[in-house]
């Protein structure tokens, strides 16, 4: 049996099913997926995209499958000097949601230890992870591996 293809992404709107994807899973180009209601399909996009909750896969047969943010293991960091915490997290190119009184990050014991040493109070929570977009636009913060001959400081 051939699965229906989803060659495009549509903006939010009515959907025939929904697929729940974590933060990493919402960055894709080609993958077999199945909605909560059982609709299986192949995402076959022309390039890798970073999906947001509410985006929809547009199937060739006219159906749509909504994207939802799956709950993830997160930690919430609070501190009197939140800007200092944010600087250290950003210096590590770590995806993070910045809110007025807290930072929300994926659970990571090494990062948790660093944040505690910087004076953070941490709380473990479950929920959708929607970090800030990367620098110079609304895209993702990608790993900092790159090839170029010049050395440069990171912080």
Image (cartoon, grey):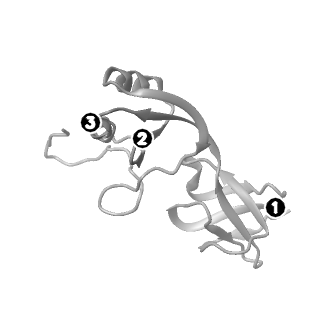
Image coords of residue 36 (percent x, y): 79, 54
Q: Residue at x 20, y 40 (%)?
A: 154
In the rendered image, which quarter is residue 138 located in? bottom left
Q: Residue at x 71, y 56 (%)?
A: 19
- Distance in Å between CA atoms under marks 1 and 3: 46 Å
How many labels sit on residues? Answer: 3
Under circle 2, the secondary element is strand
Q: Which residue is mark 2?
A: 103
Residue 153 located left or right of residue 35: left
Q: Which residue is mark 3?
A: 84
- Whether residues under marks 3 and 2 lie with C-beta atoms below 8 angstroms apart, the answer is no
Observer-nearest of 42 and 124: 124
Observer-nearest of 4 and 119: 119
Under circle 1, the secondary element is loop
Q: Quadrant of the C terminus?
A: top left
Image coords of residue 109 (percent x, y): 47, 23
In front of the other: label 1 or label 2?
2
């Amino acid at each position: 049996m051939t699965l229906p293809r989803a060659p495009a992404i549509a903006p939010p709107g009515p959907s025939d099913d929904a697929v729940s994807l974590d933060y990493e899973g919402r960055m894709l180009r080609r993958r077999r997926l199945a909605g909560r209601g059982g609709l299986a399909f192949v995402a076959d996009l022309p390039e890798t995209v970073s999906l947001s909750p509410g985006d929809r896969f547009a199937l060739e047969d006219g159906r749509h499958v909504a994207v939802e943010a799956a709950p993830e293991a997160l930690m919430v960091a609070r501190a009197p000097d939140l800007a200092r915490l944010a600087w250290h997290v950003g210096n590590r190119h770590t995806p993070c949601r910045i809110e007025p009184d807290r930072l929300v990050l994926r659970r990571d014991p090494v990062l948790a230890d660093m944040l505690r040493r910087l004076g953070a109070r941490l709380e473990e929570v479950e929920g959708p992870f929607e970090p800030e977009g990367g620098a110079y636009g609304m895209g993702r913060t990608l790993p900092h591996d790159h090839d170029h001959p010049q050395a440069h400081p990171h912080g």
